[in-house]
Image: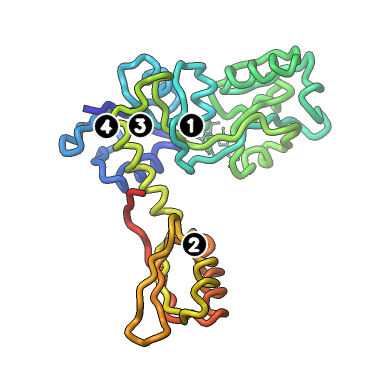
Amino acid sequence: MLRIAVPNKGSLSGPAADMLHEAGYQQRRESKELRIVDPENEVEFFYLRPRDIAIYVSSGRLDIGITGRDLLIDSGANAEEILPLGFARSTFRFAAKPGTAEGIDDLAGKTVATSYEGIVAKHLADSGVDASVVHLDGAVETAIELGVAEVIADVVETGTSLRNAGLEVFGEPIMKSEAIVVRRTGADAEEPKVQQFLRRLQGVLVARTYVMMDYDCRVEQLEKAVALTPGLESPTVSPLHNEGWVAVRAMVPAKEAQRIMDDLYAIGARAILTTAIHACRL
Ligand SMILES: Nc1ncnc2c1ncn2[C@@H]1O[C@H](COP(=O)(O)OP(=O)(O)OP(=O)(O)O)[C@@H](O)[C@H]1O
Ligand SMILES: O=P(O)(O)OC[C@H]1O[C@H](OP(=O)(O)OP(=O)(O)O)[C@H](O)[C@@H]1O
Ligand SMILES: [Mg+2]
């Protein structure tokens, strides 16, 4: 039975459960459940604090986990990223009252408050900057107003929390994060159950980002049309009953679908349809 760690609360929890559900796995019915077994898929899910997940996985007691890239790096656990999942995207940045600092070199001698002490201490050390780090559990934006620190380092998504606190980011982003799948560093990459789990999640990612496009076009226009819809490998082209016409089917990125439909129409393609992909294995 594959043992998988899933975030039990916070920004990662809902989207992770949605993705697992889309990939065909049973998920818990209420948020107090700490562990469930999905016997049909031979998987056991453990609902854990996102911050602790890399540590459990590095211990080898759980096979894989879903967490944030920033949380993995911050934990310093002996675990590695094996698949980015595209949700819970954020950047990790320094921020302060306007005029406090312009770049990391201005932090020498200052105090930085953060919930991500591991990332910040390493980043300061790598940059050769001698600043103090104060660990806070959350709501670090308030630390400046209350005089605990001159600078904070925190997750920024929309920037609303910083604006509300009258703070501004400065310097280069410390890192970019998103939800990821992790496993113990050096664990068997070919383990079939792990591979099957990853293929299912990849299937969800593809189904979310691509649509299927079908259209008819004249044989003379086929090369131009296929250049617009090259598909992932190569489009399917079938003859129509009407001579001189073909039907084409290809996957296209969902975000570009409307533009591609306009371009196909402009070169004479007709009956252009897009349909959602519900699941796939590439
Ligand atoms: N707006 C956001 N706020 C917090 N974390 C976010 C946000 N957007 C993405 N994330 C990501 O979610 C993960 C943080 O999850 P976690 O559950 O620890 O924090 P949280 O949502 O702040 O919950 P908590 O209430 O426990 O602090 C990180 O990987 C972070 O990059
Ligand atoms: O850029 P934004 O869209 O405003 O999002 C970022 C904010 O969200 C998170 O806080 P959260 O609500 O998780 O509270 P916490 O600080 O107590 O963890 C994070 O710590 C920032 O404060
Ligand atoms: Mg938080």
Q: Earlier in the sequence, mark 3 or mark 1?
A: 3
* Marks 1 and 4, how far apart at CA: 22 Å
Mark 4: is the Cβ under 8 angstroms from ligand 1?
no
Give the residue type at disc 3. Val
Report whether 210 appears left or right of 141.
Answer: left
At which x and y percent is residue 212? 40, 64
Residue of label 3:
6
* Residue tagged 2: 230
Mark 3 or 2, nearer chain start: 3
Q: Nearer the viewer, mark 1 or mark 4?
A: 4
* SS under mark 1: strand
Please identify the residue farthest to the left as the structure is shown: 39
- In the picture, the disc for residue 68 is 1
Using the numbered discs, state the Cα–Cα distance from disc 4 to disc 3 in whole angstroms: 17 Å
Q: Is ligand 1 closer than 8 angstroms to the Cβ of mark 2?
A: no
* Badge 1 amino acid: Gly
